[in-house]
Amino acid sequence: MLTVFQARGQQPKHRSAAAQEENRTVRRSTRDETWSRTDHSMDLTKSLWLVWLPCMLTGLSGLSYDYRDYPDSYYNDISEAGKQEAVTSSPCEGRDQSRWDKLFTMLEDSHMRQNMMLEAGEETVRNLREEIQSRSCSSSTLEESCSSLGQQLERRLDAVVDEVKQAADRLQAQCGSALQRLENFTGLQASRLEKLENGYLGQVMMKSQQDSGVDGGKLERALMTTAADLQRVHTQLALLQRAAAHRYLPSGCEMALLFPMRSKHSFAEVTLSPSLSLTALSVCLWVRVTEALDRTVLFSYSSRRNPQELQLLLDRDTLIFTVGSEVGVVQAAGAGSEGRWRHYCGLWRSEGGVASLWVDGRQVSGSSAVAQGCKLPEGGAVLLGQEKSSSGMYRDMDAAAAFTGKMTAVNMWSRALDPEQIRELANQDGACGQRGDVIGWGVSEILPHGGAQYIS
């Protein structure tokens, strides 16, 4: 009986040693796992749980194996040193406290590093937001600077354009005054030459009468030489007068439209009343053509359905007037002249379809049954120096139909003019004295495009 108790009394020592070894193994695995989880920044609560779990298990083990040591005669070869080493020790004793303190310190340091990284990320986000805001402010400031610079450039450009216009006006005025002085000088020289001729001929006749003995052959040669000299002077004066006439506009006209080049973009557009609908009309204008091709358009009225509803055009030196796209119904050969001012008029009445052409105040052609009983459609557009394309788009215009030269006194009436009125319009002394009720030169809005411009 006593032997059994002695054997049972030794059993807790073996179990305590196994539990101690098991606790050491658990502590080592717990420490390794704790370090691994510390490197991966595990949650602090889970780490504390894993740290304190061995302590709880050790306490429970101590309670389970706390048997009394009964003295007996049985000896199991365990030395006193082994007994001392076999004493159960808790992982929470003082010699291990420094290790756990280090572990907690490292966990706190890891948590602090996480907080520092979060604060650094937030600081970076704030810096980026401020930089974006500053850049947006800079872009708005740049836009304002560009707008201000654009306005300054526009003002400077307007000032330069005004200076160029003023310089052109001064140059035109100087040229006009110089040409006027030249014309006056040529007239004065012509009168002086005429007086000189009359005086010289009178002196020659008187001398011939006084000196009846002078050789007749010499007198005849002298007269022929004088006549040749006078002929050369008259020729030069005529050339000067024609050059001066080309520089000037018809009398009474202060401005003209200049079409400097043949281009599909060079034309002038006339603004009409949208309710225009005519059964009779008259179109008159002054023209100085630089060069006329097979189809050079002077005046063109286009409707919604027909881009060539009413036209006045040149085919080389032939003037053509069309109504309702009936091409060539009224034409006059030899009416076109390049390099000089000509006055053209086209008349039409729906009643009887009477149409006629007038050149420089004289009727040169006429026809009947031209668009008889028709009416000029409303809602159309008038172009000077060009015609609309069949598509109605400006970019599809034909450059070959463009007019080059000068044009002034463009008028249109809603009636057929009388012959006397046409002759007055063709008189260069009062070329711009009358204005039409549909289109009035100097009153109606006429906008030049593509290089066409007003001159004076």
Image (cartoon, helix red, strand yellow):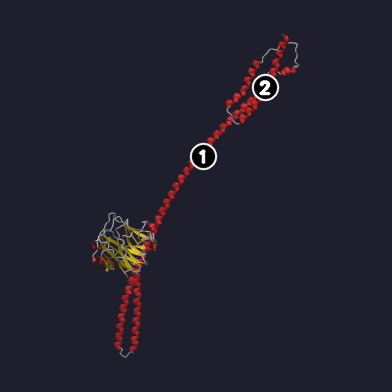
Name the foreground residue: 147 vs 355.
355
Residues 455 and 402: in front is 402
Q: CA distance from mark 1 to mark 2?
A: 56 Å
Q: Mark 2: which amino acid?
A: Glu
Image height check: is 176 above or below 69? below
Quadrant of the rendered structure where residue 291 is? bottom left
Q: Residue at x 49, y 41 (%)?
A: 132
Q: Residue furthest bottom?
A: 213
Residue 280 as seen in the image, left or right of residue 114: left
* Label 1 sits on residue: 128
Question: Would you place residue 185 above or below residue 127 in this image?
Answer: below
In this rendering, the answer to whether 232 lies above or below 8 is below
Which circle's residue, 1 or 2, is located before the other in the chain?
2
Observer-nearest residue: 354 or 218?
354
Label of residue 22 in the image: 2
Which of the 4 image quarters holds residue 196?
Answer: bottom left
**At x 71% / y 14%, what residue is drawn?**
10
Farthest residue toward the top? 1
Residue 66 image position (x, y, % from top left): 66, 14
